[in-house]
């Protein structure tokens, strides 16, 4: 006869408690932006000045751990 407490695996009694860690990550991402302009030169000037809007969200190309908070 198998009793309920006997059926429990032994690993559950020694289960390691996990903690939630936070980190500051430096993420580099390429995005596609667009701007209306008469010429490519004008478009470059507008982009350099911060004009335009994001057309596509892009992809992460690099992720680097900057700081792990262990408090």
Image (cartoon, rainbow, N blue to C red):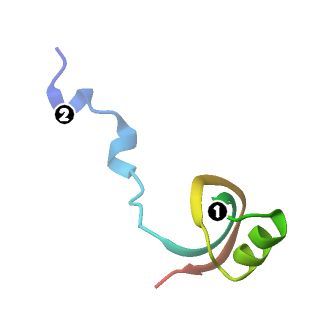
Q: Is residue 8 above or below residue 24?
A: above
Q: CA distance from mark 1 to mark 2?
A: 71 Å
Q: Is residue 15 above or below residue 63?
A: above
Residue 58 spot, x, y in % from top left: 64, 53
Q: Quadrant of residue 50?
A: bottom right
How crowded pointer 1 is (Cα within 10 Å; few <14, some 14-19, many 20+) is rated as few
Q: Nearer the viewer, mark 1 or mark 2?
A: 1
**Residue located at (34% from left, 33% from top):** 9
- Element type where label 1 sits in the image: loop
Seen from the viewer's position, the closer of residues 16 and 5 is 16
**Residue located at (25% from left, 26% from top):** 7
Q: Which residue is denoted by mark 2 in the rendering?
A: 5
How crowded pointer 2 is (Cα within 10 Å; few <14, some 14-19, many 20+) is rated as few
In the rendered structure, find residue 36 and report the number of the disc placed on it: 1
Residue 70 spot, x, y in % from top left: 51, 81
The answer to whether 6 appears left or right of 29 in the picture is left
Seen from the viewer's position, the closer of residues 25 and 67 is 25
Q: Quadrant of residue 10?
A: top left
- Element type where label 2 sits in the image: helix
Seen from the viewer's position, the closer of residues 15 and 7 is 15
**Residue located at (77% from left, 77% from top):** 45
**Residue located at (41% from left, 66% from top):** 19
Q: Is residue 61 above or below residue 5?
A: below
């Amino acid at each position: 006869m198998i009793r309920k407490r006997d059926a429990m695996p032994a690993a559950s009694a020694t289960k390691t408690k996990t903690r939630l860690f936070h980190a500051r990550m430096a993420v580099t991402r390429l995005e596609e932006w667009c701007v209306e302009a008469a010429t490519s030169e004008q478009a470059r000037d507008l982009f350099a000045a911060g004009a335009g809007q994001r057309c596509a969200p892009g992809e992460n190309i690099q992720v680097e751990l900057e700081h792990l908070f262990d408090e």
